[in-house]
Amino acid sequence: MKNKYLREIKEKLLAYEITTTELNDILSDYDQMFDDGLEKGLSDQEVIDFLGNPEKVVRELSESYILKSENKHRYSNKIVALMPFLTTVTYVILGLYFDLWHPMWLIFLLIPVVAIISNARTNIIQTLTALSPFIATVTFILLGTYLNAWNPAWLVFLIIPVLGVLNSKDFWKSFGFIVTILMACFIYLYAGYAYNAWGQGALAFFLPFAYGILTNDIKVSFGKGLLVKITVVLSLIIYFVFGFFFNTWGYLWMIFLAIPMVSIIRYSGKNARLVALMPFISTIIFFCLGYFFGLWAISWIAFLLIPVVAIIKNA
């Protein structure tokens, strides 16, 4: 009984930042106290009742120690807090000395990426799903900037729903959706490169949409959220129509920022609305100044509007 009691105390203490010497001293003390109780004629259970069960003992001792998980979390939080400063300094250095104002502004995406990774759970698919919008954006901008492959580079955004369905417990539903996505991509690319019929090829993406409706994963309804749904549809139509006919792939992707912005305007409270909108407004200002006027060297200052507006709002 004594060995089991001491073993449980040890196992629970190992969850804390404690040295081997301190751990051995604690176990030695409770070993001695346990023996003293037995010498006084107490039974094993009476000794345990007197000393306290392992949970109570460790709870009292834990006031002097920090959980390993908490210490790791604190360390992660420090890194996350430093990321805005580190990314800004890195961006300015890359811009001043290597003239990489664009597309190295993508380095600012490390801020949310590091935050996601630092709070990640053990499920790698869920972590990748959370990271997929940033991975897709970086890939899209780099392919577009250096290879002028805005179309079909936008296909990389399809990794977002693909990774999303991989979190589903229904394997065959997920498998069917991924197959329809791949089929649509193949038809689209074949029609585009073989016949220069990008517009007609894009119709293939009705395949995964139809599959989603058939499997009841996509529900077409009207009512609450209608404005956001209309925004989604209009954004897709505007992006593809203008992209195909006016080659606006390089900058019209910003139209998709209208989706969260409309949602914020429609459903958030008036007091928090402007603060919530500022990351999107700052991104639009930043990219427009850089893309259309070549002002990447100074347009990043637009991101300072985010904390400035928040401070003014809460002043």
Image (tube, grey):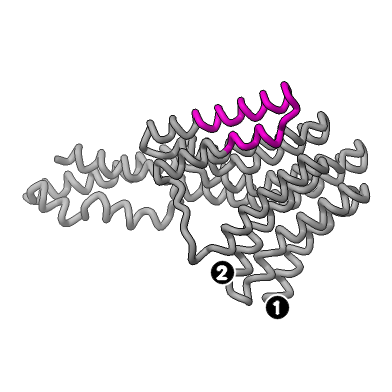
Residue 90 visible in the shown view: no
Q: CA distance from mark 1 to mark 2?
A: 24 Å
- Taking the spot 7% from the left edge, 48% from the top edge, the residue there is 43
Query: Is residue 198 magenta-colored?
Result: yes
- Which residue has dot 1 on it? 315
Q: Tell me the element at label 2.
A: helix
Q: Position of residue 230 (x, y in %)?
A: 60, 59
34, above or below 200, in the image: below
274, above or below 135, in the image: below
Q: Is residue 111 left or right of residue 168?
A: right
Q: Amino acid at mark 2?
A: Tyr
- Taking the spot 67% from the left edge, 52% from the top edge, the residue there is 235
Q: Is residue 273 left or right of residue 177?
A: right
Tags 1 and 2 touching, CB below 8 Å: no
- Which residue has dot 2 on it? 267
Q: Tell me the element at label 1.
A: loop
Image quadrant in which the C terminus is located: bottom right
Image quadrant in which the N terminus is located: top left
